[in-house]
Amino acid sequence: MRAAHASGKPFFVTTMSVSNHKPYTYPAGRITEDPQAKKRDQVVKYADYALARFFDMARREPFWTNTIFAVVADHGARVYGSQTIPIRSYEIPMLIAGPAVVKTARHASMLGCQLDVGPTLLGLIGRPYDSFFFGCDLLKDPQSRRRVLLHHNRSVGIYAEERLVVFSMNKKREYYSGDPKLGQLQLVPAPDERMKELERDATALFQTADSLYMTQNFRVNPSSTVLRESRAFKFSDP
């Protein structure tokens, strides 16, 4: 980050921590606990220490004043549950820091997923941009656009307006309703019209993403050729 800042060009850096995964190892001398114990709660403490040390060091750097920092998870401490997609295990935080965009601390609870990270950060930069993101700007786009796309094992799903539609192997589909923050979602024997519409949205999103990726067209094209091609895709029953 120092070298990128010294070049005078905008930069993007991403890193992934795997501390909270077996075999639960971390360097000795960072926290008081013995790393040979290989315990989950200790590696979580080490990850907390490492993240705090990173921000403490970053605050002393010249790029601190004009850099947006984002910390986001992929799932909770444990992914468990009897449902095909245990959605409660996928409630995650996202922390945005940096004096350029965060003047005062605040907490915002909203529906979103990892697809929304890119659009939200680009929105904070404050410049026009073109993208193929399937997500939305969580701080600007209306609530009506909010949805969550999920993936667990060999199943994918979409959640919005207290409805969850799950697609699994052999064309299996399941429908759930409820607020995951309040309790376990309930299996619905027959989908309502809004759930059917959500099912069609998911089919369009997942198949468009697959088609763009497999044809190597998942990129911004100034000529809008890709947009025309994406509208021409024929969606099929998954």
Image (cartoon, rainbow, N blue to C red):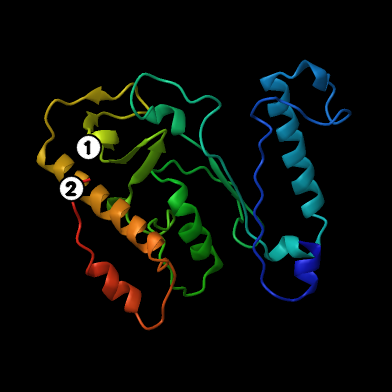
Residue 168 appears in the rendering: no
Extreme residue toward the top, this view? 37
Q: Can you tell which mark lies on residue 171?
A: 1
Q: Secondary structure at mark 2?
A: loop
Q: Quadrant of the C terminus?
A: top left
| Nearest to N terminus: mark 1 or mark 2 | 1
In the figure, residue 24 lies in which quadrant? top right
* Residue 204 horizontal side relative to residue 91, left or right: left
Looking at the picture, how far across and down is residue 232, in whole percent? 22, 69
Q: Nearer the viewer, residue 37 or 217?
A: 217
Q: Give the residue type at disc 2.
A: Asp
Looking at the picture, how far across and down is residue 210, in whole percent? 35, 56
What residue is shown at x 51% (from left), y 42% (from top)? 107
Q: Nearer the viewer, residue 5 or 218?
A: 218
Instruction: Kindly check if marks 1 and 2 are in contact, taking CB atoms under 8 A apart as contact.
Output: yes
Q: Secondary structure at mark 1?
A: helix
Residue 211 appears in the rendering: yes
Q: Which residue is mark 2?
A: 237
Q: CA distance from mark 1 to mark 2?
A: 8 Å
Q: Give the residue type at disc 1.
A: Lys
Q: Nearer the viewer, residue 178 or 115?
A: 115
What residue is shown at x 54% (from left), y 45% (from top)? 106
Looking at the picture, how far across and down is residue 66, in whole percent? 68, 66
In the figure, residue 6 lies in which quadrant? bottom right
In the figure, residue 183 lies in which quadrant? top left
